[in-house]
């Protein structure tokens, strides 16, 4: 009985994971050709952390999820992701300045000794930090490479063959979908 329930749960988990991967890929493939595209779902942005400037809040290799927000709703202490040159940076707001109706944010990494040299304009704000998933960024970085894509394809094909083989050999019946 327990084996049957466990097998059904594992089958369900496999299907859910495959559906989520396909769904995420379909949503983000269409944006890959766009300049300055950030993966996500609607207002939620998903990004990998590449440095330790915000340690211990989050570390290199973590994945952070942020939500697009009106810059006027941001306050001191919020963690924001913003465009800085050709890259994205995620730091804590240490001061908000309203200069002639334009918002400027002074930011600093939690693990940095000094604040960032330049203020961030409200037009460069991407999202406000919501939560992190530890170490998932390393997996995503691996999956983006050739070795990762090859490994994932191999594992999916292997899983399908194993399931088909088990289904064909179970009680002498042929596998049915």
Image (cartoon, helix red, strand yellow):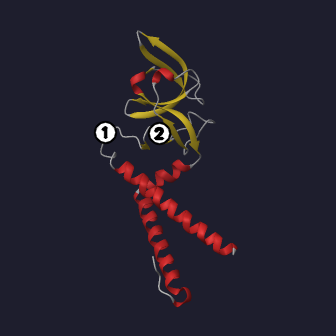
Please name the residue that numbered disc 1 is placed on. 35
Task: Quarter of the image for the N terminus: give it.
Answer: bottom right
For the point 46% across and 73% down, the residue is 160
Relative to 98, residue 25 above or below: below
Residue 82, position as x, y percentages in the image: 45, 30
**SS of the residue at dot 2?**
strand
Please name the residue that numbered disc 2 is placed on. 44
Q: Nearer the viewer, residue 147 or 37?
A: 37
Residue 98, position as x, y percentages in the image: 46, 12
Q: Residue furthest bottom?
A: 172
Residue 105, position as x, y percentages in the image: 48, 20
Q: Residues within 10 Å of mark 1 (few under 14, many from 20)?
A: few
Residue 39, position as x, y percentages in the image: 42, 44
For the point 55% across and 68% down, the residue is 11
Q: Nearer the viewer, residue 14 or 115?
A: 14
Instruction: Tell me which label, 1 or 2, sits earlier in the chain.
Output: 1
Which label sits on residue 14? none
């Amino acid at each position: 009985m327990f084996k049957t329930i466990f097998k059904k749960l594992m089958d369900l988990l496999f299907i859910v994971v495959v559906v989520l991967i396909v769904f995420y890929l379909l949503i983000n493939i269409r944006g890959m050709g766009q300049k300055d595209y950030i993966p996500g779902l609607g207002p939620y942005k998903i990004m990998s952390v590449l440095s330790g400037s915000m340690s211990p809040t989050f570390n290199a290799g973590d994945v952070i999820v942020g939500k697009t927000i009106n810059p006027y709703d941001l306050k001191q202490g919020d963690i924001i992701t913003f465009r800085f040159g050709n890259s994205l940076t995620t730091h804590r707001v240490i001061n908000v300045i309203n200069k002639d109706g334009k918002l400027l944010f002074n930011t600093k990494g939690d693990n940095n000794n000094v604040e960032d040299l330049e203020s961030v304009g409200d037009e460069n704000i991407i999202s406000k930090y919501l939560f992190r998933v530890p170490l998932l960024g390393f997996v995503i970085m691996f999956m983006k490479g050739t070795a990762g894509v090859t490994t994932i394809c191999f594992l999916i094909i292997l899983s399908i063959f194993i399931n088909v083989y088990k289904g064909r050999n179970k009680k002498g019946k042929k596998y049915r979908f």
